[in-house]
């Protein structure tokens, strides 16, 4: 009983009762979204009636593109935190510092709230966003989450926390 997936259980009961309680999606209604102007139109049109851009039910290779961007962001995360990004000049003594070095310097100078904001926004938030988006892509690729709402919540949380740092929103699978 402990391994019972309640969503799968209720969906099976609904199926046996002849009910269709699955979420209604645009794809199930044969609607496609324009990736340029975001208009929802019949997928058989093949072109957006508003802007003329091609319509697709799903972006082909979106999981692979997202993973490629995530791997690139992960690789670039290392030099962004290791290479010097600022020069502090105290009493005619210039010192190059990394983000973490700057945080330590600000703590030593007594500016703990500013150091905390910089550390959270420049180190923790991008790292958390990368981890969350890797998890979402893994769960989509491996089919590990039966409930798409969990993936949506995780993606929206990553998108929300990304607004509090200098990271860009990542297109998702």
Image: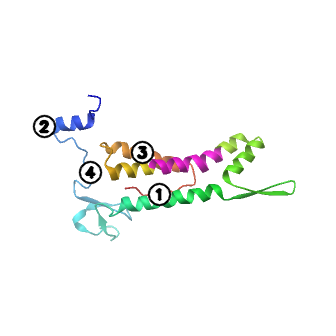
Tell me the residue that label 1 is attached to.
Answer: 70
| Distance from Cα at disc 2 to Cα at disc 3 | 31 Å
Dot 2 or dot 4, earlier in sequence: 2
Quadrant where the C terminus is found in the figure: bottom left
Neighbour tally class for label 4: few under 14, some 14-19, many 20 plus, Cα within 10 Å: few
User: Which of 24 and 149 lies nearest the eye of the viewer?
Assistant: 149
Q: Residue at the location (22% across, 58% down)?
A: 30
Badge 2 or badge 3: first in the primary sequence: 2
Q: In the rendered structure, which segment of residues is drawn in magenta?
A: 117-132
Q: Which mark is residue 25?
A: 4
Sequence-first tag of 2 and 1 = 2
The residue positioned 67% from the left and 52% from the top of the image is: 99
Q: Are marks 2 and 3 in contact (CB under 8 Å)?
A: no
The quadrant in which residue 147 appears is: top left
Query: Pointer 3: what residue?
Result: 154
Question: Residue 87, position in %: x, y?
Answer: 75, 58
- Between the residue at mark 2 and the residue at mark 1, the CA separation in whole angstroms equals 41 Å
- From the image, state whether disc 1 or disc 3 is nearer to you: 1
Instruction: Find the distance from the CA under tag 1 to the CA under tag 3.
Output: 15 Å
């Amino acid at each position: 009983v402990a391994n019972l997936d309640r969503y799968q259980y209720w969906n099976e009961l609904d199926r046996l009762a002849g009910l269709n309680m699955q979420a209604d999606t645009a794809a199930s209604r044969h609607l496609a979204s324009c990736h340029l102007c975001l208009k929802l139109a019949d997928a058989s049109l093949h072109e957006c009636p508003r802007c003329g851009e091609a319509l697709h039910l799903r972006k082909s290779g979106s999981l692979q593109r997202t993973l490629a961007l995530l791997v690139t962001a992960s690789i670039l995360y290392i030099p962004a935190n290791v290479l010097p990004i600022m020069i502090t000049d105290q009493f005619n003594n210039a010192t190059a510092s990394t983000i973490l070095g700057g945080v330590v310097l600000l703590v030593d100078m007594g500016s703990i709230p500013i150091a905390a904001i910089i550390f959270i926004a420049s180190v923790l938030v991008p790292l958390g966003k990368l981890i969350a988006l890797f998890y979402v892509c893994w769960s989509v690729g491996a089919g590990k989450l039966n409930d798409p709402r969990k993936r949506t919540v995780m993606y929206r949380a990553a998108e929300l926390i990304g607004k509090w740092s200098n990271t860009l929103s990542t297109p998702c699978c």
